[in-house]
């Protein structure tokens, strides 16, 4: 039966700038078997175009921007008041622009603050974001991941930045990405009634999202989680093993 195969990226398709061995071949085989591929990432830094380019560069699979859904896109769905002060990268700005939402570089004008992964995060940006939310701006988190995997190990994720803004601003952020409802709604709409399989390396995001919706869940052991407390449909060494299990 044709299904929507929802693949996480970091720790599933690649680690940093290195593709997971066999990932490209597996993606090609999944598509050749008639399934639809959707790449779903909590990393809000890159645009869908940049993500598709990276997938092709690291794995050889010719991903298309239309196959990419990010936590930045889910966060944009939650914005009800503009302008928006962004702590993050081009991925967030592109998602807001696609919905016609104004972005401001002046945090004192902000009606909403969106926080995502931002390698340039510093004290001045923390102070600006925290002051804006203390003055009444809404706070949206692209995701709450504390870390993300790379070739060299785990690095701080967007959740670490969000926690700093929450602490300094005295408010709790509204989360958008996996495993939360805004992202689940986007995937449900993309599925259009097809069965959904979620392939991920984290139980607290990828698999929890699948559990919440009753979707099939696949834990791969190439990223963050090596064990889980839930009961995923499959536990595989890597995505390279997935095609033989899809029927």
Image: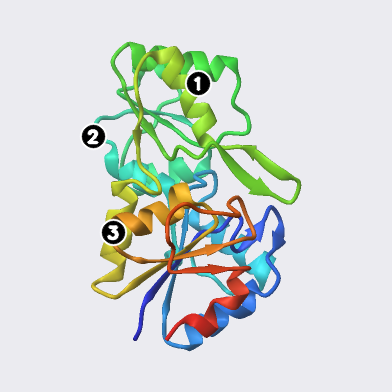
Image coloring type: rainbow
Describe the element under mark 3 as helix, strand or loop: helix
Describe the element under mark 2 as helix, strand or loop: loop
Q: For mark 1, what is the residue?
A: 164
Q: Is residue 93 above or below residue 68?
A: above
Nearer to us: label 3 or label 1 = 3
Q: Which mark is residue 80?
A: 2
**234 left or right of 79?**
right
Q: For mark 3, what is the residue?
A: 213
Q: Earlier in the sequence, mark 2 or mark 3?
A: 2
Q: Earlier in the sequence, mark 2 or mark 1?
A: 2
Describe the element under mark 1 as helix, strand or loop: helix
Q: Residue at x 49, y 33 (%)?
A: 159
Cα distance between the residues tagged 3 and 1: 30 Å
Q: Residue at x 52, y 35 (%)?
A: 158
* x, y percent for residue 246: 45, 82
**167 left or right of 189?**
right
Q: Residue at x 34, y 57 (%)?
A: 211
Q: Quadrant of the C terminus?
A: bottom left
Q: Are marks 3 and 1 in contact (CB under 8 Å)?
A: no
Nearer to us: label 2 or label 1 = 1
Cα distance between the residues tagged 2 and 1: 23 Å
Which quadrant of the view contains residue 193? Answer: bottom left
Q: Are marks 2 and 1 in contact (CB under 8 Å)?
A: no
* x, y percent for residue 62: 58, 74
Q: Residue at x 63, y 68 (%)?
A: 237
């Amino acid at each position: 039966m044709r299904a929507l195969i929802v693949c996480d990226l970091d720790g599933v398709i690649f680690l940093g700038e290195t593709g997971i061995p066999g990932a490209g071949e597996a993606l090609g085989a999944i598509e050749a078997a008639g399934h639809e591929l959707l790449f779903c990432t909590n990393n809000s830094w890159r645009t869908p175009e940049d993500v598709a380019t990276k997938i092709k560069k690291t794995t050889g699979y010719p991903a298309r921007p239309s196959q990419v859904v990010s936590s930045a896109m889910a966060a944009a769905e939650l914005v009800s008041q503009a302008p928006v002060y962004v702590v993050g990268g081009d991925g967030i700005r592109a998602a807001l622009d696609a919905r016609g939402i104004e972005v401001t570089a002046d945090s004192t004008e902000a009606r909403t603050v969106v926080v995502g992964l931002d390698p340039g995060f510093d004290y001045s940006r923390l102070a600006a974001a925290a002051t804006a939310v203390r003055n009444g701006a809404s706070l949206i988190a692209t995701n709450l991941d504390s870390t993300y995997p790379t070739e060299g190990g785990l690095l701080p994720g967007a959740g670490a930045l969000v926690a700093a803004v929450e602490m300094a601003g005295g408010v709790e952020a509204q989360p958008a990405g996996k495993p939360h409802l805004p992202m689940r709604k986007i995937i449900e709409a993309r599925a259009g009634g097809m069965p959904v399989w979620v392939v991920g390396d984290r139980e607290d995001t990828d698999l929890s999202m699948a559990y919440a919706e009753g979707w099939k869940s696949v834990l791969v052991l190439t990223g963050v989680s090596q064990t889980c407390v839930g009961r995923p449909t499959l536990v595989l060494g890597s995505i390279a093993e997935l095609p033989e299990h899809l029927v």
